[in-house]
Image (cartoon, rainbow, N blue to C red):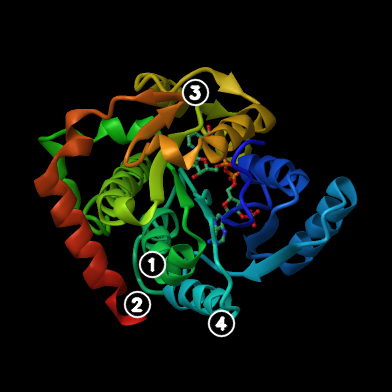
């Protein structure tokens, strides 16, 4: 792989697309940190990865992304190593929980796991990422973010915790839109420090996430041109493509879909909405920064 990273941290690397990405990354020889929530499953997978790749530098970091204190603990653990980090892939995510549940901190679970944890982890890890520069941050989103319209946004942000109305797909779309706002904001802040921040839509991929969807939900996603179905291995290639882009190309703050740059829709570029979302996020995670 061109531009091979030295040290990478991947969230959600023990299932689905992340698992396929971990296998490909391990083979590059990178020092790889995988965040996990199930210690037995993670240990078995790390052993498998080592055997498969011959790479001995694969480590697990326990973290429940539905708990801000757990996210902060993982980030602090990594920072305590004083290691540079030149690739962070925020991949973990959930979709379609039929009933509203809340995180340890009382936030709606989809928003908490997909977005608040990404926000907190990325900001906390910045000292290590700065040490690792030139470095890359890859945030995994979904083109389904487009289902939030300009008319919806004020209502959705007012009820971000979904206490008045719970729609799992709305929460998913909001979490992915929010990650895109974070992507753009951080890209501006970090550009001069040779740290790129890009968003990736992996297409529609056969994983546990897609298996849990009803026919109607699949149709709903399809309406937003979310791409053709592929395997986790095919989707993982798209991650590796982004990892291999030369830093000198100065591509940052952009959205990738199917290995191509993709034009974000106006709502994703709305600066007022972005500021509202990021100010809110900062307040929600403030105690753990
Ligand atoms: N599949 C698609 O069609 C599709 C389309 C567009 C975007 N995406 C995005 O691609 C990314 C990967 O999705 P996927 O399809 O691979 O999903 P998946 O197979 O369900 O894997 C999700 C990963 O997130 C981890 N995770 C979930 N909740 C967690 C928590 N509370 N704490 C720690 N880890 C947690 C899971 O850990 P465990 O291994 O312990 O379960 C798993 O590794 C997501 O961001 C998703 O939104 C997927």
Mark 1 neighbour class, 10 Å CA radius: few under 14, some 14 to 19, many 20 or more: many
Secondary element at image label 4: helix
Residue identifier under label 4: 80
Identified at 72% across, 65% down, the residue is: 59
First of labels 2, 4 by sequence position: 4
Label 2 lies in ligand 1 vicinity (Cβ under 8 Å)? no
x and y percentages locating residue 246 in the rendered image: 50, 37
Mark 1 vs 3: CB contact within 8 A: no
User: Of marks 4 and 3, which one's residue comes earlier in the chain?
Assistant: 4
Name the residue beneath numbered marker 2: 289
Mark 2 or 4, which is nearer the eye? 4
Alpha-carbon span between mark 1 and mark 2: 7 Å
> Closer to the camera, 63 or 79?
79
First-in-chain label (4 vs 1) = 4
Residue picked out by circle 3:
258
Query: Residue tagged by mark 1?
Result: 120
Distance between mark 1 and mark 3 Cα atoms = 28 Å
Nearer mark to the viewer, of 4 and 3: 4
SS assignment at label 1: helix
**Structural distance between the alpha carbons of marks 3 and 2:** 34 Å
Few, some or many residues within 10 Å of mark 4 (<14, 14–19, 20+): few
């Amino acid at each position: 792989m061109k531009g091979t990273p030295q040290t990478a941290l991947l969230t959600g690397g023990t299932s689905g697309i992340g698992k396929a990405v971990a296998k490909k990354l391990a083979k590059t020889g990178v020092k790889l940190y995988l965040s996990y929530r199930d210690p037995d499953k993670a240990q078995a997978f790390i052993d498998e990865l080592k055997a498969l790749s011959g790479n001995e530098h694969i480590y697990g970091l326990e973290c429940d992304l539905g708990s801000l204190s757990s996210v902060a603990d993982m980030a602090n653990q990594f920072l305590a190593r004083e290691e540079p980090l030149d690739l962070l892939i925020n991949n973990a995510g959930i979709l379609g929980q039929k009933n509203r549940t809340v995180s340890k901190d009382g936030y709606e679970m989809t928003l908490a796991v997909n977005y608040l944890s990404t926000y907190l982890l990325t900001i906390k890890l910045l000292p290590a990422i700065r040490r690792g520069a030139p470095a890359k941050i890859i945030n995994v989103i979904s083109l389904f973010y487009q289902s939030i319209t300009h008319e919806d946004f004020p209502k959705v942000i007012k009820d971000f915790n979904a206490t008045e109305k719970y729609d799992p797909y709305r929460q998913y779309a909001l979490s992915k839109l929010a990650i895109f706002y974070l992507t753009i904001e951080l890209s501006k802040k970090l550009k001069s420090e040779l740290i790129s921040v890009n968003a990736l839509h992996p297409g529609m991929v056969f994983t546990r996430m897609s298996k849990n969807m009803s026919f109607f939900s699949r149709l709903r996603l399809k309406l937003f041109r979310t791409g053709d179905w592929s395997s986790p291995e095919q989707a993982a290639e798209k991650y590796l493509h982004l990892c291999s882009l030369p830093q000198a190309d100065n591509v940052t703050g952009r959205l990738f879909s199917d290995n191509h740059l993709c034009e974000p829709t106006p709502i994703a570029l709305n600066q007022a909405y972005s500021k509202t979302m990021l100010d809110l996020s900062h307040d929600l995670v403030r105690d753990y920064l």
